[in-house]
Amino acid sequence: MPQLSLMTPLGEITVSEEDGAIVALDWGRGRDQTETPLLRAARAQLHDYFDGARTGFDLPLAPYGSEFRQRVWAAMRAIPAGETRTYGDVAKLLGSAPRAVGQACGDNPIPIIIPCHRITGSNGALGGYSGAEGPATKRVLLALEAGATRKGTALDEPCDPHP
């Protein structure tokens, strides 16, 4: 499986591709480093994201997960950058329980790109985060997006997948 690592303000992350789609984003450096057009596009879009030049991603995704988890991850991708929804909001939208939404968030194989950091607790609490430094990382991602949306940056413009 082709992988490409990149340095971010949160440390190294590794993006993995399978059958022409992104299937994982992991914290840390991957063992194998293979540059493909899709992984180069993912790296460019992630650099733009961390530079505050974009908050959305234009990449083919194929996360492994149940039909329910796929629905939760699609709901997360529909949350506009700079905004949050509660676990309860997403559960109500999907006709499920907040705890099930939280579990799907924790099992998200493509964090940042599938923005599980945009899901918070109903009492205003940040909630958990499975990546890097946990809730501290979630706080950084939310602040990054809030700053980018305040600047009025053209955030969701498609990126040429073959730079």
Image (cartoon, rainbow, N blue to C red):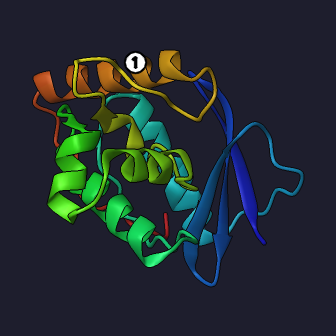
Q: Is residue 81 toward the left or the right of residue 130 in the image?
A: left
Q: Residue at x 65, y 69 (%)?
A: 17
**Residue 83 occupies quadrant:** top left
Q: Nearer the viewer, residue 115 or 55?
A: 115
Q: In terms of image quadrants, where is residue 1?
A: bottom right
Of all residues, the one furthest to the right in this rendering is 31
Q: Position of residue 12 (x, y in %)?
A: 70, 33
- State whether residue 16 appears in this view: yes
Query: Compared to 84, does 23 lie above or below?
Result: below
Residue drawn where x is 40% and y is 18% of the image:
139
Q: Is residue 65 left or right of residue 3?
A: left
Q: Is residue 135 above or below residue 107?
A: above
Q: What SS does tag 1 mark?
A: helix
Count of numbered tags: 1
Identity of the residue drawn at 74% across and 60% down: 3
Percent of width and height locating residue 113 = 43, 50
For mark 1, does the 10 Å Cα neighbourhood hold few (<14), some (14 to 19), or many (20 or more) residues?
A: some
The residue type indicated by label 1 comes to Arg
Give the camera-side residue of 60 and 107: 107
**Residue at image x 72%, y 54%?**
4
Res 159 visible: no
Q: Position of residue 118 (x, y in %)?
A: 30, 37
Residue 89 in the image: x percent, y percent? 17, 45
Residue at which label 1 appears: 139
